[in-house]
């Protein structure tokens, strides 16, 4: 996605705060479509029950955890070009992969127990907002946000760069809430829910494989292709 991020960032080759803000919004909305985000959120929401509101809440909370990390670790990059040590960055990336694997394994366990078929609301209590926030917090340390932060760090005005970083982080969270609400709305349709319970094992296996590959790629044992 590097080329797309650079193309979007070129729209902000000016000094106007409004233009930079629009670029940051576009980067934030696009950032939510990165493969590691889609894999994590799909596994996070799976089995939570067919509720758009519940899915949107968890997605936004996950996104706010992610935004918190983006601000905490992105600000030093934007202001001072101060980066995490390579070893810590690698550990964070590996941890992201492990979290995706854990979420995928949870999905497969719930499918095997038949929890994905329940409509009595029991599935709604399996993941708390605090847990979703914590997962997003960890994901924000690693994950795929680096390209967007580096592009924002190229803005010469530090105030504008910090504003752009904040908008980028916020709209990453907003876009995850939108995606999650859409996911929950789709599952609230009975035909979709029946089909989802059929393909859930494949989704879980795909997310598990992706998480394992993501962790191994962080260790440079397999190629990183995204």
Image (spheres, helix red, strand yellow):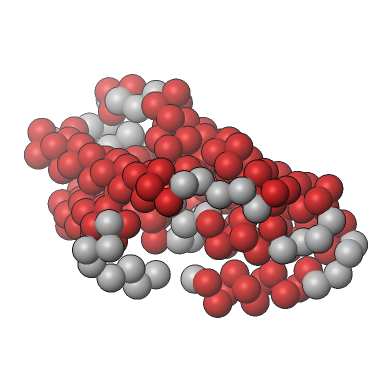
The picture places residue 216, in percent across and down from the top left corner, at 24, 57
Viewer-proximal residue, 196 or 168?
168
Left or right placement of residue 136 versus residue 216 in this view: right
The residue positioned farthest toward the left in the image shown? 112
Relative to 206, say whether 46 is above or below: above
The residue positioned farthest toward the right in the image shown? 16
Residue at the image point whose x is 22% and y is 32% from the top: 118
Residue at the image point whose x is 31% and y is 48% from the top: 94
Left or right placement of residue 183 versus residue 122 in this view: right
The picture places residue 108, in percent across and down from the top left corner, at 15, 43
Q: Quadrant of the C terminus?
A: bottom left
The picture places residue 14, in percent across and down from the top left corner, at 86, 69
The picture places residue 99, in percent across and down from the top left corner, at 30, 41
Viewer-proximal residue, 106 or 17?
17
Viewer-proximal residue, 170 or 3?
3
The answer to whether any part of residue 187 appears in the image is no
Residue at the image point whose x is 83% and y is 48% from the top: 159
Relative to 25, say whether 40 is above or below: above
- Counting every numbered tag in the picture gives 0
Residue at the image point whose x is 48% and y is 60% from the top: 33
């Amino acid at each position: 996605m590097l080329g797309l991020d650079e193309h979007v960032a070129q729209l902000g080759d000016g000094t106007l705060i409004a233009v930079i803000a629009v670029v940051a919004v576009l980067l934030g909305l696009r950032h939510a479509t990165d493969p590691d985000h889609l894999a994590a959120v799909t596994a996070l929401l799976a089995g939570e029950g067919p509720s758009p509101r519940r899915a949107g809440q968890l997605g936004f909370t996950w996104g706010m955890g992610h935004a918190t990390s983006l601000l905490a670790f992105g600000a030093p990059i934007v202001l001072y070009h101060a980066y995490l040590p390579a070893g810590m960055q690698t550990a964070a990336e590996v941890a992201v992969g492990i979290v995706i694997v854990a979420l995928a394994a949870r999905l497969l366990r719930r499918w095997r127990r038949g929890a994905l078929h329940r409509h009595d609301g029991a599935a709604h209590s399996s993941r708390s907002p605090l847990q979703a926030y914590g997962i997003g917090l960890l994901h924000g340390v690693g994950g795929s946000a680096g390209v967007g932060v580096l592009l924002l760090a190229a803005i010469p005005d530090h105030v504008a760069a910090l504003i752009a970083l904040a908008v980028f982080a916020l709209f990453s969270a907003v876009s995850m809430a939108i995606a999650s609400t859409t996911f929950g709305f789709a599952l609230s349709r009975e035909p979709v829910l029946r089909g989802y319970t059929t393909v859930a094992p494949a989704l879980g296996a795909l997310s598990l494989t992706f998480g394992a590959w993501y962790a191994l790629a962080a260790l440079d044992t397999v190629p990183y292709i995204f």
